[in-house]
Amino acid sequence: MRVLVTGASGFIGSAVVARLHAGGHEVVAVVRSRGPAVRRLPAAGLAVVDIARATRPADWIGHLAGIDAVVNCAGVLQDSPTDSTEGVHVTGIDALFAACETAGVRRVVHLSAIGVDRGAASAFSRTKLAGDERLMARDLDWVILRPAVVVGRAAFGGSALFRGLAALPVVPVMPDTGPVQVVQRDQLVETVLFFLAAGAPTKIAVEVAGPERLSMEDIVRRYRRWFGWRPARPVRLPAWMAAAAYRLGDLAGLLGWRPPIRTTARREIVRGAVGDPSLWSTMTGLAPQSLDAELATEPASVQERWFAQLYFVKPVVIVILTLFWVLTGLISLGPGFDIGTGLLEEGGLAPVAGLGVIAGALADIVIGIGIAWRRTARTALYGALALCVFYLVTGTILVPRLWIDPLGPMLKIFPIFMLHVVALATLDDR
């Protein structure tokens, strides 16, 4: 079978691609952009498509040649300058469904979300439901899977957040959070393969959920026990602090990052992520696996403990580096201007001392802004490393006495340099 998979580099999509490939199927992976995650995909073909902008059937027809089935794993949590819930969940994906009708691709397995048919808590659930309805109106052999929160050995989004919270010395408990029936990623992928098989039921919407209702605190406690750490004391956050955390997540989203803690999550989590897995289990023969049972199959590795402990370190490092460069530049342009020019004059560059300080300050500010913006963060971090080396060499040549300064301005370049290396090492989300 030749299968086109959208959202192929994502948490669920990449697992679907790998399983299809392992089963001897040909896969055409649809991704928004090329990158390390894409290069790891074992796909026979690659289609770079921004689904939110591919709103005409003609945008998809060329990618459906020889395709037997489509699996849609694309999704975004919240609107941002780089993401559109309406585009990805409704208009873009409906254009793909229309193209499937035209090209004669009958089988479509579509991943939605549990609870979207029980009220729209946010633009996420509203658009997910609209996408479901568009597919149900098509003359196709469709299957809609509505999973709860998906977890697995890999981690992204909410599943990564659980691990990060488990690594904290105290467990922050958000107010007004509903129960969650976490489902294992492997079981969801098995379900996708089941419905792709010839003779599988079609024109059906199925909830895919775990066997037990857990609170967020319960889930974090289980992960902490799996990591081998002592229980942590839960701390219930006041409403204003939780609201501030969600707003900070929204700000990060505006800068191109994709934190799971955003106002959409706040609206969705009040409802929780629960459903009835009986139909799913009866049809597929899969027994929903509990979180404890899944975690018991293999102990946590040191790599997984590292990831959990670095989860909240990463955003803190990005914020610190952003502030470091921006504030350094502003100080150089303001109260530190005379100090800067004095150092350049001491090094024999009196004619261009003022210009040199201004140029350096502007470079610092540009680097800081570049680190804050997700699309330019990697380039800016490399630029910061180059600037650290430049400052080290230039300072050594012009004002060598700085090496014996009690405050260690030259020596401090080395830990600053390594902090940028840490940021680069942890920059990828998946």
Image: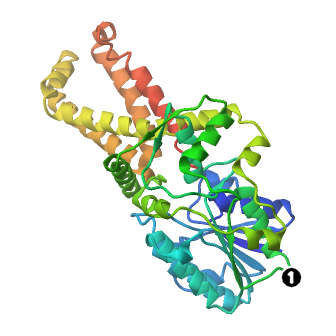
Q: Is residue 308 left or right of residue 382?
A: right
Q: Position of residue 190 (x, y in %)?
A: 79, 64
Q: Is residue 394 left or right of residue 12?
A: left
Q: Which residue shows up at 47% across the image and 74% down it? A: 120
Q: Which residue shows up at 56% across the image and 80% down it? A: 131
Q: Is residue 210 above or below residue 389?
A: below
Question: SS at mark 1?
Answer: loop
Q: Amino acid at mark 1?
A: Gly
Mark count? 1
Q: Is residue 270 above or below residue 366?
A: below
User: 22 or 289, which lies in front?
Assistant: 289
Mark 1 Cα shell of 10 Å, populated few (<14), some (14-19), many (≥20): few
Which colour assignment does the render follow?
Answer: rainbow
Q: Is residue 72 left or right of residue 383?
A: right
- Residue ID for mark 1: 199
Q: Is residue 42 visible?
A: no
Q: Is residue 215 above or below residue 411?
A: below
Q: Position of residue 343 (x, y in %)?
A: 20, 19
User: 380 or 234, which lies in front?
Assistant: 234
Q: Which residue shows up at 52% across the image and 43% down it? A: 427
Q: Position of residue 256 (x, y in %)?
A: 42, 56
Q: Is residue 163 visible?
A: yes
